[in-house]
Image (tube, helix red, strand yellow):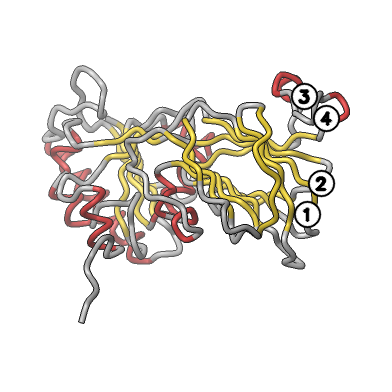
């Protein structure tokens, strides 16, 4: 098993913990006590054969290392940043939390060490997390019938930019912070045109993030779905909608601000103009996230967000 440790270089405690974990794994390697192990979901057995630390690795660097396990030391933002790099690499990820809440980075350092044998044996619980892919295309409404943007025509076009997201793809109004007007088409069916401060298209993984703050629902990470949540809509009846993961969501702007942006997981931000549209679909590959066996997703929500708890005196 080849293991890469990716600490958040802006967090000294995460960098120090990565060094401690590196020594621990090297001791196992040196003693020949790597323990027969296999990546989660894999077959056969393997031993720790190589372990290294990379800070802010590029996709090319990770492909060259070809890890069978990635351990991220940071917060949820560090997991999201890593997901941008390892998408479609089909490598399991474990997160050690040195941030604030830590839903994706579910382990403390001590919990990770305690679960190390379980993780290396491929017996730790995990979830396969859906990711989104979004592409910014030029508008082709002149060729569309009935005002519907044909996806077949878009698929033949060349996108200006593309990105992936583990949590969400967000259109933010931006400066000068006036409301923007967007049209939503779902599976090539026109649904609504609305004014708001933007819109969030979230996965179940991202349902505890911007989606939740914008009034969207909590969704179990095992559910493969997308959530469409408006940001402060100029309407009392526009409620968040949960869509099948197989859906396509096409967003066509009717009015934008100069500073309107398309945001991928808060990691990549791209400009967006009224001559363009955004097509959001399920990405071809997600990531496998190793879960903390000591606490469930719902226990974590109750503990960290005080979800469903009674009012306190």
Q: Bin the neighbour count of mark 2 within 10 Å (Cα to Cα): few under 14, some 14-19, many 20 and up.
A: some
Q: Earlier in the sequence, mark 3 or mark 1?
A: 3
Q: Earlier in the sequence, mark 4 or mark 3?
A: 4
Name the residue located 21 percent from the left edge and 54 percent from the top edge.
299
| Percent coordinates x, y for residue 31 in the rendering | 12, 38
Mark 3 or 1: in front is: 1
Residue that numbered label 3 is attached to: 157
Left or right, 193 with respect to 97, comes to: right
Q: Residue furthest front?
A: 237
Q: Give how far apart the Cα atoms at labels 4 and 1 are.
A: 18 Å
Say if 44 sits above or below 306 in the image: above
Q: Bin the neighbour count of mark 4 within 10 Å (Cα to Cα): few under 14, some 14-19, many 20 and up.
A: some
Name the residue located 52 percent from the left edge and 42 percent from the top edge.
165
Residue that numbered label 4 is attached to: 140
Residue that numbered label 1 is attached to: 256
Residue that numbered label 2 is attached to: 274
Q: Bin the neighbour count of mark 3 within 10 Å (Cα to Cα): few under 14, some 14-19, many 20 and up.
A: few
Nearer to us in this view, 70 or 298: 298
The quarter of the image holding the N terminus is: top left
| Percent coordinates x, y for residue 130 in the rendering | 43, 34
């Amino acid at each position: 098993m080849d293991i890469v440790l990716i600490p958040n270089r802006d967090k000294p405690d995460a960098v120090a913990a990565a060094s401690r974990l590196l020594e621990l794994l090297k001791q196992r390697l040196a003693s020949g006590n790597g323990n027969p192990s296999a990546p989660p979901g894999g077959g056969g057995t393997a031993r720790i054969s190589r372990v290294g630390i990379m800070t802010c690795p590029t996709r090319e660097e990770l492909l060259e290392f070809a890890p069978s396990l990635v351990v991220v030391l940071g917060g949820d933002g560090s997991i999201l940043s890593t997901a941008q790099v390892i998408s479609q690499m089909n490598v399991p990820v474990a997160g050690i939390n040195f941030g604030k809440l830590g839903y994706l980075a579910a382990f403390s350092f001590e919990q990770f060490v305690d679960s190390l044998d379980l993780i290396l044996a491929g017996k730790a619980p995990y979830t396969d997390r859906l990711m989104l892919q979004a592409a910014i295309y030029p508008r082709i409404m002149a060729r569309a019938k009935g005002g519907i943007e044909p996806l077949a025509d878009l698929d033949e076009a060349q996108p200006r930019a593309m990105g992936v997201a583990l949590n969400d793809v967000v259109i933010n109004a931006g400066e000068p912070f006036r409301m923007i007007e967007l049209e939503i088409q779902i599976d090539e069916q026109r649904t609504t045109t609305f004014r708001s401060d933007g819109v969030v298209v979230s996965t179940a993984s991202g349902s505890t993030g911007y989606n939740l703050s914008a009034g969207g629902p909590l969704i179990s990470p095992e559910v493969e779905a997308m959530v469409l949540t408006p940001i402060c809509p100029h309407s009392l009846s526009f409620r968040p909608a949960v869509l099948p993961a197989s859906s396509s969501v096409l967003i066509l702007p009717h009015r934008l601000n100069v500073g309107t942006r398309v945001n991928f997981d808060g990691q990549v931000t791209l400009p967006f103009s009224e001559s363009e549209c955004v097509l959001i679909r399920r990405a071809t590959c997600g990531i496998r996230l190793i879960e903390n066996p000591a606490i469930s997703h719902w226990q974590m929500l109750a503990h960290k967000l005080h979800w469903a708890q009674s009012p306190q005196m």
